[in-house]
Image: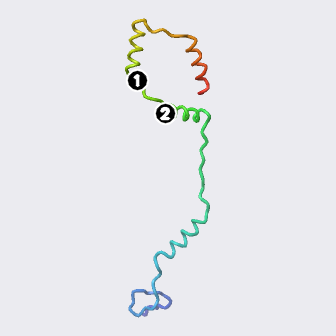
């Protein structure tokens, strides 16, 4: 029984004059076609509340550190009954802070 090898590229035979296909040829053709397609884009839209929280978080991060000794002095003054509060100033600050929300 005889085997017919005509039309078959056998790159391992010493008499073969044709080169084997380069490994990057097929993959580069595929990758160039896929690079032509536009990339899908995702988008996210933050709610008004999320935007406000983001802005407030940035303000908190930018705020100066707390003076622990001043806090301790105020706590002691409150405990001793020496700390007085001005209700008008407190009300004004509450009203002005409404702009943050």
Residue 66 vs 32, above or below: the answer is above
- Horizontally, is 45 left or right of 70 in the view? right
Q: Secondary structure at mark 1?
A: loop
Q: Residues within 10 Å of mark 2 (few under 14, many from 20)?
A: few
Residue at figure coordinates x 43%, y 7% from the top left: 82
Colouring scheme applied when the structure was drawn:
rainbow
- Horizontally, is 100 left or right of 70 in the view? right
Q: Nearer the viewer, residue 80 or 47?
A: 80
Q: Nearer the viewer, residue 31 or 97?
A: 97
Q: Secondary structure at mark 2?
A: helix
| Quadrant showing the C terminus | top right
**Alpha carbon separation for disc pair 2 and 1:** 15 Å
Image location (x, y in percent) of residue 98: 60, 23
Residue at figure coordinates x 54%, y 68% from the top left: 31
Snapshot quadrant of residue 29: bottom right
Q: Which residue is labeled 1 in the image? A: 67
| Quadrant showing the N terminus | bottom left
Residue at figure coordinates x 43%, y 87% from the top left: 10
Badge 2 vs badge 1, beta-carbon distance below 8 Å: no
Image location (x, y in percent) of residue 27: 50, 72
Sequence-first tag of 2 and 1: 2
Image location (x, y in percent) of residue 71: 41, 18
Residue 12 vs 90, above or below: the answer is below
Q: Which residue is labeled 2 in the image? A: 62
Residue at figure coordinates x 42%, y 6% from the top left: 81
Snapshot quadrant of residue 38: bottom right
């Amino acid at each position: 029984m005889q085997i017919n090898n005509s039309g078959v590229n056998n790159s391992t035979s010493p008499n073969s004059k044709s080169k084997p296909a380069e490994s990057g040829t097929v993959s580069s053709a595929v990758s160039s076609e896929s690079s032509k397609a536009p990339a899908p884009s995702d988008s996210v839209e933050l709610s008004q509340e999320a935007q406000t929280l983001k802005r407030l978080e940035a303000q908190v991060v930018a705020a100066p550190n707390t003076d622990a000794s001043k806090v301790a002095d105020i706590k002691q003054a409150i405990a001793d009954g020496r700390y007085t509060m001005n209700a008008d100033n407190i009300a004004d600050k509450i009203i002005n802070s409404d702009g943050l929300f």
